[in-house]
Amino acid sequence: MDVDKKIQEVLEFLKVEAEIITKPFKYHKDIHKLLKGIYVLIQDEQVMYVGKGNIADRQRKHWKKANGALKIKDPEGWHWLNKNVPISPKDWTIKYLILHKQTELSAVEGCLIHIFQPLANNETFIDEGRTL
């Protein structure tokens, strides 16, 4: 699946403009601390997670989860991912979309989760009926 193309289609459909930045996930610490928007974590064209919020803060937490530092209260999707899929977060890519309006954040995130069915998102985990 062409992740870039699908993201552009969602933005066009929703009539939302966003700056899109792509970088290796291992450089998540370089993301400006105040950026808010949507982020997509990708391994080999497979979307692992889609989220929204303060991008830098969320990536610090996701880096730990992706590297197996899970807490019992972490979403079931992350637990399932770590147990069932060979992952290598150092090889992941992060795409983040800088957005400011809450309605745009919610709409874009929901569309991308629906389209990509990311493995670690609880919405996908629950919809797929997965169990630990």
Image: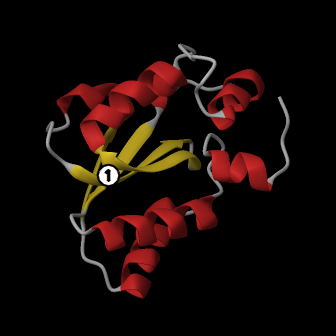
Q: Furthest-front residue in view? A: 73
Q: Is residue 53 left or right of residue 80?
A: left
Write down the quadrant of residue 7 in the picture. bottom left
Taking 82 as reference, is 2 above or below it?
A: below
Q: What residue lies at 40% left-to-right and 74% top-to-bottom?
A: 8
Assign the C terminus to one quadrant of the image.
top right
User: x and y percent of residue 40 in the render?
Assistant: 44, 50
User: x and y percent of residue 6 in the render?
Assistant: 50, 70
Mark 1 = which residue? 96
Q: What residue lies at 58% left-to-right and 27% top-to-bottom?
A: 74
Give 93 or 129, whichever is nearer the viewer. 129
Q: Amino acid at mark 1?
A: Tyr
Query: Element type at marker 1?
Result: strand
The mark tally for this picture is 1
User: x and y percent of residue 101 in the render?
Assistant: 24, 69
Q: What residue lies at 53% left-to-right and 45% top-to-bottom?
A: 49
Q: What residue lies at 30% left-to-right and 79% top-to-bottom?
A: 16
Taking 97 as reference, is 78 above or below it?
A: above
Please say which color scheme the image uses.
secondary structure
Q: Is residue 38 left or right of residue 110?
A: left
Write down the quadrant of residue 63 in the picture. top left
